[in-house]
Image (spheres, coloured by chain):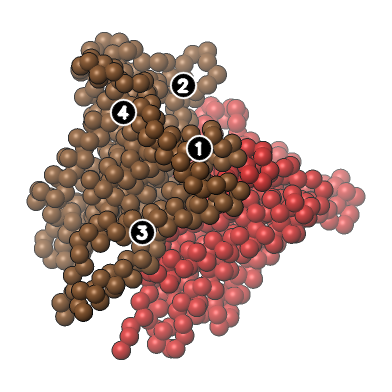
Amino acid sequence: MFETLILILDATLRVSTPLILAALAGLFAERSGIVDIGLEGKILGAAFAAAAAAAVFGSAWIGLLFAIIASVALALIHGFACITHRGDHIVSGVAINTIVAGLTVTLGLDWFSQGGQTPALTGDARFTSITFPFADALADVPVIGLIYSELLSGHNILVYLAFAIVPFAVWIIYKTRFGLRLRAVGENPHAVDTAGISVAFIRYRAMIICGILCGLAGAYLSTAHNAGFLKDMSAGKGYIALAALIFGKWRPVPVMFACLLFGFLDAVAVRMQGVQVPGIGEVPVQAIEVLPYVLTVLLLAGFIGKAVAPKAVGRPYVKERG
Amino acid sequence: MSQPKVPVWVNLALIPFINIMLAFLVSALVILAIGENPIEAAGYLVYGAFGYEEGIGYTLYYATNLIFTGLAVSIAFKAGIFNIGGEGQAYIGGLGVGLVCLAVDQTMPFYVIVPLAIIGGAAFGAAWAYIPAYLSARRGSHVVITTIMFNFIASSLMVYLMVNWLKQEGRMSPNSRTFEESAWLPYMHEMLAAIGINIEQSPLNASFLWALICCVLIWGLVWHTRWGYQLRTVGTNATAAVYAGIDNGKVTIWVMLISGALAGFVGLNEIMGVHHSLLLNFTAGFGFAGIAVSLMGRNHPVGIILAAILFGALYQGGSELAFEIPSITPEIVVVIQGLVILFSGALEHMCKDRVEAFFTRTSAA
């Protein structure tokens, strides 16, 4: 029983990693006032870039670099539309998701001739798991051994990185000058403008951070969690991250816990397949799968707590001219 | 200060034309990048979509779905609501159509089943749109996020229903049983053959006519009724609408019901017209494509018909293209669709402002 729990939590960490990265990406965007429905597209684009570059150069790190470049480029397109041209944030996000869904398969087929997939990655082209010191030696120690060797040790570097970024994001958002301005721009851009700070520049920087984080999430999917790119492999993770962002009320640590909760549900859903629960019978996998979405809907409707978005989110800022 | 007038044709024709040309230009660059000739590709695309009767049939068959989802998105847009949930509403609407067919196909005649199926599709699609609409109007939820979530919930619900309840006994694939022929919509080639016109076979069916009827009905509703006026007022200036005594929440809910019902009619084409059974994933992204159609068609029924035919042609021509040039996938059409959304939606001000400035300057001079 304890071992099962550890295995589920272990899977939770793996599944939550891309959600945490993407949700933090969304957090930076939305805190600056940009709604980003395009998280999904950026993750998918980054996953493709990572796998393609890793396959060509044989290095997961070069893959990661290309993933970040691709994702930042997409984030800047979103910024160009929403910040510079006052376009509708949702429409722009939908556009990016659609373009990426088509472009990854189109380019993938042309480059690798495997029906839109990338070649299977092996060796250095993937991020492999890191084993902590003495993990094997301690594995037999009761309770602690299992937690240390199974749950904490044995993940790839991006998993640890994702969890390390959370306190870093807290520090940036709440303790730095940039963070203060970022939050101010999302709440009251006029005030920021009056203080002589460029609203557009802060929002563009937020989009670059958003792009970098989505790049990490995408690279994780195709070069760490899986061994290559598959068509539509982001499979709605960008939207779940968006849900987690709302669920965590736009704050880094609660957002991380929301991602862990949704990851946990995912891990449980896999385990529950065909399992008879006493008194209930078999719980349909789909019922667990939809929980993140249902919970988010209920939260947004104010049935469980209240989610208040940054005030200026989704509204283009038009500078007043004298 | 009075606004200088820009000629009507600039807004209705020139700007959409420039936007679609930009989208085509970028697509051509993508085709160049993968080492193919974009002009040759365009040739195959046009031939595949319009070059022969079967191709035209397929183009209009795809256009049927796109008219339904395009109308669904655009009527919500008219009221200032972004209904991104067309995909889920079409899915559940199709479920409604399928359930009606499965329930009565063995006992009722064709002319009873059709109206029942239309009601079924509309009711299920509208019901799926009602919850986000209610939550938005009465509890202040964000309608975009809620409808996105409902797309995923619809998808899981359908998998659950198909696998656990509706799957035909003894089959591996999650399909329902095939309907009796009394619940099949007639194909266009059958209907035309009955009046002595022979055309090649294609999946084009009677639901295309229903799509055109819906366009007329929506046109009348939005532009020629008191309620349509309310809807447009809410969309143009929600605050003014409140002062004019309009119940914005009520308008929101009704618009979303109509929007969901329209999306649900995709089921008529796919379930009753072509597949003749319930199955998974028959919506195939048409709900999202409706966003591009609605933007391209400037939220007007005539524009939507034209845009739907354009995108239908891209879908059909894209298959032909992929067949002729194997290094190009039909997904190139998805890229074009995304670019259209980008240029005519997200970047609408980029061209519009410049073109309008050009015309106001020349007319002032």
Which chain does the red colour mark? Answer: A
Q: Earlier in the sequence, mark 4 or mark 1?
A: 4
What whole-number distance in Å separates the C-alpha atoms at marks 3 and 1? 24 Å
- The residue located at (50%, 77%) in the rendering is A202
Q: Chain of mark 1?
A: B
Which residue does the numbered mark 4 point to in the structure image? B268
Q: Earlier in the sequence, mark 3 or mark 4?
A: 3
Which residue does the numbered mark 3 point to in the structure image? B18
Q: Nearer the viewer, mark 2 or mark 1?
A: 1
Q: Nearer the viewer, mark 4 or mark 1?
A: 1
Secondary structure state at the residue bearing disc 2: loop
What whole-number distance in Å separates the C-alpha atoms at marks 3 and 4? 34 Å
Is A233 situated left or right of A1 in this image? left
Q: Nearer the viewer, mark 2 or mark 4?
A: 4
Where residue A204 sits in the image (x, y, percent)?
51, 73
Q: Chain of mark 2?
A: B
Q: Are discs 4 and 1 both within one chain?
A: yes
Q: Chain of mark 3?
A: B
Mark 2 touches mark 1? (CB < 8 Å): no
What whole-number distance in Å separates the C-alpha atoms at marks 4 and 1? 28 Å
Q: Give the label on residue B175, or none.
A: 2
Amino acid type, residue under disc 1 in the picture: Leu
Amino acid type, residue under disc 2 in the picture: Asn
Q: Earlier in the sequence, mark 2 or mark 1?
A: 2
- The residue located at (63%, 50%) in the rendering is A48
Amino acid type, residue under disc 3 in the picture: Ile
Which residue does the numbered mark 1 point to in the structure image? B321
